[in-house]
Image (cartoon, rainbow, N blue to C red):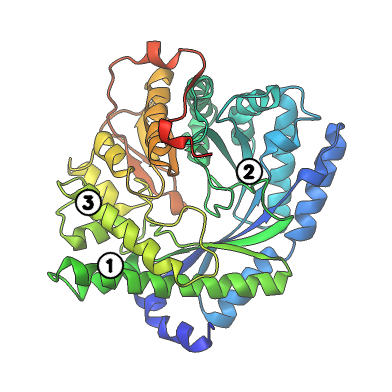
């Protein structure tokens, strides 16, 4: 049983090492909002979200006050909108109307973000999927709290290269549509392989069709706590290192379990999962890169980085899984460049390149995340990078994702400021050799042989 004594024990983690609950995310099914009439569909969406999530922010604030645990974000995820709008949306503009309805609902209930402006196209696209994807630049440039994700591949189905090729252009268009705001729209668009149905983290959260009508998912984060624990065992063996990470991850996840259960009880909505990811922020001392340095690397990107990250990710999972009834989402270590000061420092020092980041994604929780690239990067190059990362996820039966931001008017050596949790990023160089003949081939890359397990 979780008791208050355990929370008291973690006070020093909260005060000294930046432990927080990164998000309480309410997942809401919108399948019962489907209607052939667009206006009625939007009315039902707005009514259901505001009814179920009306007390979400107040509940999070009450838990914060009662247990003195920082809860950074309160968020909502919804059923992939390509499914919800399929009956009433005949054009990309129709989907934009739903996007604005979702944004209005998010503002009404006071959450930080709403995710689920999404399509699942790992094997092919319906017309509704295509229309939603085509609507993304306008949807993300005319809303402020909406996040979008597209799942283009899976281990069971392969990779839909038609969608991958299309999304290279969509990323460019989204950058252009939001260029007055540092191309911020691209920071709210994630491309996935093997996307989980219960991820509470943005921008990739959506409420999977296998989920209940409404659920509470919690994402915890404590890279600063892990680093502080590792400082006490500096120079010790790998056995001691691993045990320290596991024990620390256990304590961090217990905090998330408590918050999730309390929120579930207060909102009378079932508890879903705890995502035990180490998600950094731009704040000093809240960095996954600093953990890697404490393990023994001069900078992330140095030889040994992939092995160190693999060790960290595995021990976080081993420790966290024992601390919660249900662990899900992404769970492990995030390596977003703009959101982690240590990663930014490694890029600026020349230690960390896009190619090394890609290798690291083979063993971490997500993928190429929050990476700013030159604004003149070709759409086909973006598609090629996406295809590479999707292949890593497909072959290794793991979730991978891409969040690339081509910053209009900026090149290698410049920086771009996003603000808040999104931080700032150096513009990273991209391999400029052409791949357009590859990404423009029609169809999909088949599933790997080891996917056939029926």
- Secondary element under disc 1, as helix, strand or loop, is helix
User: Which image quarter is the N terminus in?
Assistant: bottom right
Which residue is at 33% across, 67% downward?
224
Asked whether, in this view, residue 204 is left or right of residue 344, the answer is right
| Percent coordinates x, y for residue 263 in the rendering | 64, 71
| Percent coordinates x, y for residue 296 in the rendering | 15, 59
| Percent coordinates x, y for residue 131 in the rendering | 67, 24
Picture quarter containing residue 332?
A: bottom left
Q: In this rendered view, identify the residue nearer to me: 213 or 282.
A: 213
**Which numbered disc, 1 or 2, marks the residue that appears first in the sequence?**
2
**Which numbered disc, 3 or 2, marks the residue that appears first in the sequence?**
2
Residue picked out by circle 3? 307
**Marks 1/2: CA–CA distance:** 33 Å
**Marks 3/2: CA–CA distance:** 34 Å
Question: Residue 338: in sight, yes or no?
Answer: yes
Within 10 Å of disc 1 (Cα), the crowding (few <14, some 14-19, many 20+) is: many
Of tags 3 and 2, the one toward the viewer is 3
Query: Which residue is farthest front?
Result: 454
Residue picked out by circle 2? 116
């Amino acid at each position: 049983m979780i008791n208050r004594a355990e929370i008291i024990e973690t006070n020093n983690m909260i005060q000294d090492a930046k432990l927080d609950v990164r998000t309480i995310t309410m997942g809401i099914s919108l399948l019962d909002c489907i209607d052939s009439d667009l206006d009625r569909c939007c009315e039902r969406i707005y009514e259901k979200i505001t009814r179920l999530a009306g007390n979400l922010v107040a509940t999070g604030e009450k838990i914060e006050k009662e247990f003195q645990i920082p809860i950074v974000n309160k968020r909502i995820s919804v059923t992939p909108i390509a499914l919800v709008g399929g009956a009433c949306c005949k054009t990309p503009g129709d989907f934009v109307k739903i996007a604005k309805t979702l944004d209005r609902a998010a503002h009404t209930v006071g959450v930080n973000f709403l995710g689920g402006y999404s399509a699942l196209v790992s094997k092919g696209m319906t017309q509704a999927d295509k229309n939603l994807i085509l609507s993304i630049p306008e949807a993300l440039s005319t809303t402020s709290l909406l996040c979008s994700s597209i799942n283009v591949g899976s281990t069971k189905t392969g990779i839909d290269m038609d969608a991958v090729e299309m999304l290279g252009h969509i990323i460019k268009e989204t950058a252009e549509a939001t260029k007055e705001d540092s191309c911020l729209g691209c920071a709210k668009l994630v491309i996935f392989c093997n996307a989980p149905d219960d991820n509470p983290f943005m921008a990739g959260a959506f409420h999977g069709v296998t989920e209940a009508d409404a659920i509470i998912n919690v994402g915890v984060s404590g890279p600063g706590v892990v680093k502080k624990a590792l400082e006490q065992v500096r120079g010790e063996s790998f056995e001691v290192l691993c045990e320290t990470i596991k024990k620390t991850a256990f304590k961090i996840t217990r905090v998330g379990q408590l918050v999730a259960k309390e929120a579930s009880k207060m909102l009378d909505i079932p508890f879903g999962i705890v995502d035990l990811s180490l998600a950094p922020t731009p704040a000093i001392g809240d960095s996954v890169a600093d953990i890697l340095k404490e393990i023994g690397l001069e900078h992330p990107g140095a030889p040994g980085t992939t092995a160190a990250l693999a060790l960290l990710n595995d021990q976080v999972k081993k420790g966290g899984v024992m601390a919660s009834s249900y662990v899900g989402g992404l769970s492990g270590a995030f390596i977003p460049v703009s959101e982690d000061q240590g990663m930014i420092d490694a890029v600026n020092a020349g230690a960390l390149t896009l190619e090394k980041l890609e290798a690291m994604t083979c063993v971490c929780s997500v993928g190429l995340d929050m990476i700013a690239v030159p604004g003149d990067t070709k759409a086909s190059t973006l598609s090629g990078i996406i295809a590479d990362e999707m292949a890593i996820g497909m072959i290794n039966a793991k979730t991978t994702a891409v969040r690339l931001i081509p910053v209009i008017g900026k090149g290698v050596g410049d920086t771009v400021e996003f603000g808040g949790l999104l931080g700032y990023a150096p513009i990273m160089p991209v391999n400029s050799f052409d791949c357009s003949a590859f990404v423009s081939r029609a169809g999909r890359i088949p599933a790997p042989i080891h996917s056939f397990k029926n």
